[in-house]
Amino acid sequence: MRLDKLISHNTPFSRSEVGRVLKDKRVTVNDHVMTKAAYQVKDTDVVSLDGEQLVHEDYIYLMMNKPQDVVCSSDEPDHKTVIDLLAPDLRHRNLQPAGRLDKDATGLVLITDDGQWNHAVTTPGRKTKTYQVETAEPITNADIIAFDIGVFLNGEGAPTRPALLEPLNAKSCFVTLTEGRYHQIKRMFAARGNRVTSLHRLSMGDIRLDPALAPGEWRALTAEEVASIGTPA
């Protein structure tokens, strides 16, 4: 792991702030001052900041059942964020949600400090995302066909990628996407003359929301869940 990344994982400093810390010669590796941000830290290296040894910690991968009215962000001064719901000892780890989920939506959010893995999750077309949706008006066969072909959203010149719409009853369905445009499902139904009243994410790729998690609860991903995402091409 790069030295600047290790420091940002173990302290409140951002990557840019770490650069200043290094320039100020506050960091030592094996009791020698180190100023190179790109230095590759070995397992046997002893890294210290202001004389305090930093622990080599692995990346963190979490799933959360996001409740309503919580923002899918790492820093939002005026709103509670998914990071605010984590244990205090995790909040300094530069964790970021992988992708976004509307403030009023609920369900699966993935959180990590592994930038490459985050990118793999959010790269359009690589992983499907499935949602349970409730609507104000009945869902029609014409809606199913339109979603399968692609829907033109207000203000955009290209249609959405084909999406799978599976009705559960007159006003409830599953929707599976392979992209993540801004408020996409709400805007797709709006383009069809309908309105989303509830949006709950069930899965991202092969990772499904753990039914044991109550709103606001989270758990670490298993090794199999982490590996299922792969790495970006």
Image (cartoon, grey):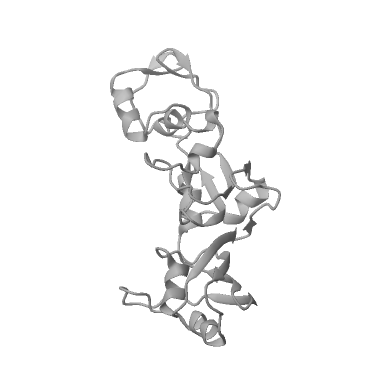
Give the percent coordinates (x, y) of residue 164: 56, 76
| Lateral position of residue 20 relative to residue 215, left or right | left
- Quarter of image, res 204: bottom right
* 30, 146: nearer the viewer: 146
| Observer able to see residue 47 | yes
Give the percent coordinates (x, y) of residue 169: 65, 76
Farthest front residue in view = 136
State the residue at coordinates (44%, 80%): 193
State the residue at coordinates (38%, 79%): 152
Give the percent coordinates (x, y) of residue 161: 45, 75
Q: Is residue 162 above or below residue 119?
A: below
Total residue callouts: 0
Give the percent coordinates (x, y) of residue 220: 63, 42
Q: Is residue 222 above or below residue 208?
A: above
State the residue at coordinates (55%, 27%): 43
Q: Is residue 233 above or below residue 94?
A: below
| Lateral position of residue 232 relative to residue 155, left or right | right
| Observer able to see residue 204 | no
- Quarter of image, res 150: bottom left
* 42, 150: nearer the viewer: 150
- Quarter of image, res 108: bottom right
State the residue at coordinates (48%, 67%): 125
